[in-house]
Image (tube, helix red, strand yellow):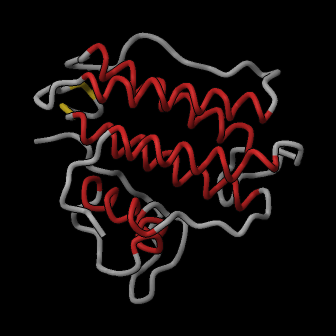
Amino acid sequence: MVVNTPMDARDVDRAVREAVELLTPHTGADWTVAAGQLTWSCWETAAHVAHDLLAYAGQVASGAPDGYLPVDYQARETARPDQLLQLITGAGRLLSTALDAADPSLRAWHWGPTDPTGFAAMGTAETLLHTHDIAQGLGLGWRPAAEPCARVLARLFPDAPAGDPASVLLWQTGRGDLPGHQPVTSWVWKAALT
């Protein structure tokens, strides 16, 4: 597993592609059901992924130094699941384009000054974790692959315990149990550089 290289646009692209490929055959299912353990529906969770990918792209493209841009990105309530997947695809592409164009020294706000690798890790994590949530809600037996989970853990959760990367990432974000560890009920990732 390659975890010693910085996360970048390719990580985001892979996560988005995998999410869309997994979920596209299931756009006719009931997306009003809860997404895994979340209180959000599968529809709301997919809209949230698109929102975050767009928001991260805006932060990176603008280099917003000390706060979030004064805009909110919302999917229309009439959007069908297939359209939400199009939004995720477009938003992911905007983030990866912004990441490709960003100077490595760029710092933009996300609870502090965050570099492009942090935004790539967050975009990847949001996509992987919420794809897992939606897959659970739709009754799909899917878990994120070990390699991207290991990369996300290395960048966003540097103090995470050893173990299967997917299991550790799911546990670290309150989505599963990890033998020998108490359940996580509150968590924050460390994207900002201090």
Residue at screen point 65% across, 39% down: 46
Tell me the quadrant of the picture where the N terminus can be found. bottom left
Quarter residue 85 falls in: top right
Number of numbered tags placed on the structure image: 0
Residue 71's spot in the image, x, y percent? 47, 11
Tell me the quadrant of the picture where the C terminus can be found. top left
Camera-nearest residue between 137 and 187: 137
38 on left or right of 43: left
Q: Is residue 18 above or below residue 78?
A: below
Residue 102's spot in the image, x, y percent? 23, 24
Residue at screen point 39% across, 31% down: 96
Residue 42's spot in the image, x, y percent? 73, 45
Q: Is residue 39 above or below residue 167?
A: above
Quarter residue 159 falls in: bottom left
Residue at screen point 26% across, 22% down: 101
Residue at screen point 38% across, 65% down: 147
Residue 59's spot in the image, x, y percent? 33, 21
Q: Residue furthest top?
A: 70
Q: Is residue 52 above or below residue 22?
A: above
Q: Is residue 186 above or below residue 177?
A: above
Camera-nearest residue between 15 and 115: 15
